[in-house]
Amino acid sequence: MKAYELQGPGGVDAMMLVEKPVPSPGTGEVLVKLKAATINYRDLLTVKGGYGSRQKFPLVPLSDGAGVVASVGAGVTRFKTGDRVTGSFFEGWLSGEPSEEKMRSNLGGALDGVLSEYRLWPAAALVRTPDHLSDVEAASLPCAGLTAWSAVVKLGNIRPGQTVLTQGTGGVSIFALQFARMSGARVIATSSSEAKIEKLKALGADATINYRTTPEWGKVVRQITGHGVDLVVEVGGVGTLNESIRATRIGGSIAFIGVLAGRPEAESRLSLMVMQQQRLQGVTVGSVEDLQAMADAIAVNRTTPVVDRVFPFADARAAFAHMASGAHFGKVAITIG
């Protein structure tokens, strides 16, 4: 089979197309013929060698993939050849609370990822792909989709009538908008592009703010809502945290996910977070059980992930470059089989 391997922390130039033997499923394992994969911001960091001390080389990159069952090992009864499946980001985190051991099983970092024609998964780490989704759409679910689900639904506990703020137009943010709307919440969305803002409105954003022309957008959010939002899905990181604190109501929550915005501002508003009894909740994807719950909700609501652009397997490096440009709206995908 063909697979891309990172030979070291040298960026996409260190990502080589190699030939590897097709693995055979052992007891309890499923061999998946991958059809599509998607890129997360975390994957851009990984190819530069900047995603934690446990990253191994050589490494097959990317965590998010979907495909078709090629064969099953002994004892596997949940799946059969031909079933469409999506693999979990943490193949060892089946349910319950996270732990160091469970989180060591992350794809495309500690373990080989999905930018290959075939991959083995433990049967317990797979879910059936919702029937209405293409393989490309399903490949956006394991990390971006589930991170947003955990932020808004599982940990955010958003209810009808509440208000959620999303930042930007990457995969997590757009999923967060969709899940907030699914939950009956109002959404305020930010972007630096007026063209992207129009797309956010078409997806159901109730209010939008251009954070480039309105750098103190937290103050504007307070004006729009009268008291602040119930939840901010914070993908910017320390560079946007001050405005997120300002935008959050007394007793509200900030789902802290990303590192997109760089360095923190000189003056921190952390004291305001204390005075307003806000909660800062770290979010790192979720379990297989969570992935199944999200897939079930997506199937019932017939939610369709937003895919910006699809690249062929041979042009995987170009897909990384497009992701790095920041021009995307939604997910950047790679077709494999």
Image (tube, rainbow, N blue to C red):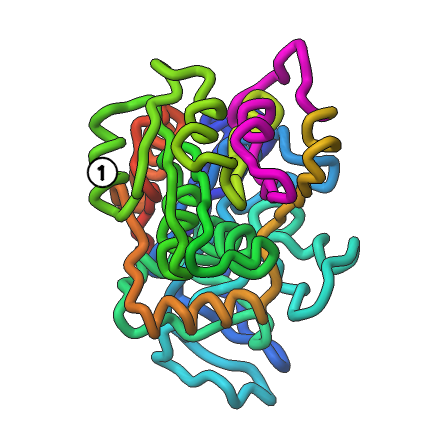
Q: Residues within 10 Å of mark 1 (few under 14, many from 20)?
A: some
Q: Depth check: 137 or 108 in front?
A: 137
Q: Is residue 304 above or below residue 227?
A: below
Q: Quadrant of residue 212?
A: top left
Q: Is residue 48 visible?
A: no
Residue 61 vs residue 270: left or right?
left
Residue 131 sits inside the magenta stretch: no
Q: Is residue 104 above or below residue 43?
A: below
Residue at disc 1, secondary structure = helix
Residue bearing mark 1: 199
Q: Depth check: 295 or 318 in front?
A: 295
Residue at x-position 51% and y-position 36%:
227
Residue 248 sits inside the magenta stretch: yes
- Please provide percent x and percent y for residue 237: 58, 29
Residue at x-position 43% and y-position 68%:
295
Give the extent of the magenta segment: 241-270
Q: Is residue 225 above or below residue 130?
A: above
Q: Quadrant of residue 1?
A: bottom left
